[in-house]
Image: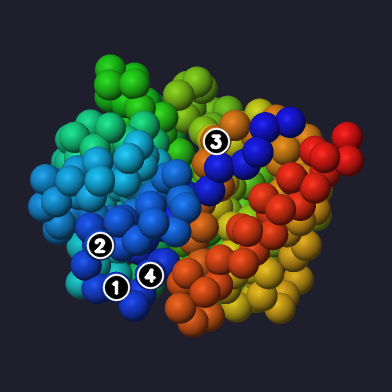
Amino acid sequence: MSALRFSANVSWMFPEIPDLPDRIRASATAGFRGVEAAWPYECPTGALRGALSEGRGLEMVLINTPPGDTRVGELGLGAVPGRQDAFRAGLDRAVRLATDLECQRIHIMAGRVPEGRDRGSVEKEMEETFVENLRYAADVLHQVGIVGLIEPINSRITEPRYFLNTPQQAAAILQKVGRENLKMQMDIFHWQIMDGNLTENIRRYFPLIGHVQIAQVPHRHEPDSPGELNFPYLFDLLEELGYQGYVGCEYKPCGDTVAGLGWMEEYHKRREERSKSN
């Protein structure tokens, strides 16, 4: 079984470093093979490319589509009725940046239930909008060899109004869209909060999973911080299933980022000891 590859989410990690390119450099120094960033659009593309090249093969693994108008509380536009034109413009912007950075995955953000609207009253319309936009996105992404991802985000704690909130809902939407270059982004933090039953859900939806992200529950810190999840078991499960992608570290470090990477050292140490015993 191949070892897991970890990517540092530089929108969350290395908060002690203000500059995004320097966070990318710090990720390479810390031993990461990939990095991901939510919205790196305001940083000059040349600076991002330069930091990646200095990392000697460091890969930009994932970016998100633009959030929309954050002044009115938007967090993605994929499922928001009436915002199709803005969604397409944002997708084009994401594709340009991903192409420049040789990034092969874009998280297509669904967005929030509009303010003042009840989820139940708009769910059908939002799903129809999302399916329409995802089919359009799949065709655009196919032309440049990029995989689109949709991510269920928990609505119990983190984002109460986020439209896409369970793996079951995401799987049903992917089936309706029917495009092979669209996958599910599994953030174990969100899946645990919404549904638990991680072993069965990971096994069931594994064929649809195009990217994995991790953080301990409930405080969203390092995998070995106090919490509900047994990450050595979950890492073994991903290995057993043959996961070949990156595992994105989308967590808030308890303190200094590098000082908190003992969990990653322990993972590699445990694999090495296991290989010697075999």
Q: Amino acid at mark 1?
A: Ile
Q: CA distance from mark 3 to mark 2?
A: 24 Å
At 24% from the left and 73% from the top, the residue drawn is 18
Residue 15 spot, x, y in % from top left: 35, 74
Check if mark 2's residue and mark 1's residue have beta carbons within 8 Å. yes
- Reading the image, the residue beneath label 1 is 17
Residue that lies at the very extreme toward the right in this rendered image: 277
Nearer the camera: disc 1 or disc 3: 1
Q: Is residue 64 left or right of residue 188?
A: left
Confirm whether residue 111 shows in the render: no
- Reading the image, the residue beneath label 3 is 245
Confirm whether residue 221 shows in the render: yes
- Reading the image, the residue beneath label 2 is 22
Position of the N terminus, as image quadrant, is top right
Q: Residues within 10 Å of mark 2 (few under 14, many from 20)?
A: some
Mark 3 or mark 2, earlier in chain: 2
Q: Amino acid at mark 2?
A: Asp
Q: CA distance from mark 4 to mark 3?
A: 22 Å
Mark 1 or mark 3, earlier in chain: 1
Mark 2 or mark 1, earlier in chain: 1
